[in-house]
Image (cartoon, rainbow, N blue to C red):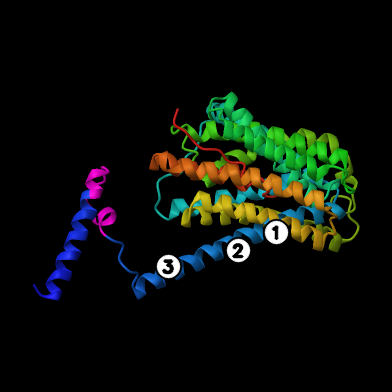
Amino acid sequence: MTKGKRAGRKRVSIRLKFAESCVGSGQALSTASCMPARRLSGADWCRLCRRTLLTLGLVVLYYSFSIGITFYNKWMMKGFHFPLAMTMVHMAMNFMFSALVRAMMQCAGERERVALPWPEYLKRVGPTAIASALDIGLSNWSFLFITISLYTMTKSTSIIFILLFSIVFRLEKARPSLIVVVILIAGGLFMFTYESTQFNLEGFLLVLTASFIGGIRWTLTQILTQKAELGLHNPVDALYHLQPLMLAALFPLFLYNEGVSLACTEKLFGFHDSEVLLWSVGTLALGGVLAFGLSFSEFLLVSQTSGLTLSISGIFKEVCTLVLATHINGDIMSPLNWVGFGVCLAGISLHVALKALRAPEVEPAVREREEAVELLLRNGLANDSDSDAESLFDIRDR
């Protein structure tokens, strides 16, 4: 037997053994599972490079809007002490932009967009809108008192309240891993705030209250978007339906706390210089553009990659936010604060990792709804900063 024939028989024998091992393990005999992976061609490498560059570009776009609106909110509160008025302007702009996008989607030949009748609209959407308005309003209000670093850390505790309410509403099963996540995040927050030189109790309580309400808000949002008959799984449709009721829910608090002051301020209604008025209107409009741009960039990132990419990107975004806060805004962080931040990030990362490990068990249709809800639970329904990036939980059919 020639040397070439022996080599050929050896290759056939190896392939047969590989196939038998597949059959023995219960795998299907297919090209994907039982044949050795082929080497990537030049065209494959080009596609991979394009895909990588596209993902990096979308992540940078998401970072720009997300970090940008965080620093915008803090900068805005230094000279414009009306956080609820600012939030309402952003909500109004989000509603207008979402209505415009809906109209464009309608003209593009897609199916007719959902429009809920008033009784069902108030009953189904109302509770979620009230919780969302209070969460966003209190979050932006806190920027009058606290630093970006303290805000970022405190808002990350939303995961604790989300897990709590998701267990109460039986959307999530209580598992030991969830207890570890809660302990890590709570312990990290304690170390971060312990003997902090820039700690402000009033601002801290505002953010903590917002995080608690955020747990209710996101649980209600999950319940709302799981109801297929409502048809609100699309982020644009959800924005369009939620913003008007959010405006109405926040208006009484705004009227009580800021109404008279805003009517008398020289920066808006009591202006004496038209340039000051134009500056105020322009800066408020800029925040609305940033808020909608954040929603749009999140939608692009999830639609072109995955919800897991968005969550992992959010973890590194938190690091970028704190580093920039120390260099740009002069936030002071001790070594213990950084250790606390690391412990908190470890809890968030564990939550994301556990979610990723459970992902293969979820049906594709359910996973699609999960990614849609993931957009809504983040700033798709919010105008505040995106520090709640990893506070997402899995969607399960009920």
Residue at image location 48% in from the left, 33% down from the top: 226
- Can you identify the residue that label 2 sits on? 60
- Residue 2 screen position, x and y as percent: 10, 75
Amino acid tagged 3: Leu
Residue at image location 48% in from the left, 43% down from the top: 357
Classify residue 209 by image quadrant.
top right
Q: CA distance from mark 3 to mark 1?
A: 27 Å
Amino acid tagged 2: Val
Helix, strand or loop status at disc 2: helix
Classify residue 218 by image quadrant.
top right
Helix, strand or loop status at disc 1: helix
Amino acid tagged 1: Cys
Which circle's residue, 2 or 1, is located before the other in the chain?
A: 2
- Can you identify the residue that label 3 sits on? 48
Residue at image location 55% in from the left, 64% down from the top: 56
- Can you identify the residue that label 1 sits on? 320
* Residue nearer the viewer, 35 or 138: 35
Which stretch is magenta? 21-35
Query: Badge 1 local density, few (<14 within 10 Å), some, or many (20+)?
Result: few
Q: Nearer the viewer, mark 3 or mark 2?
A: 3
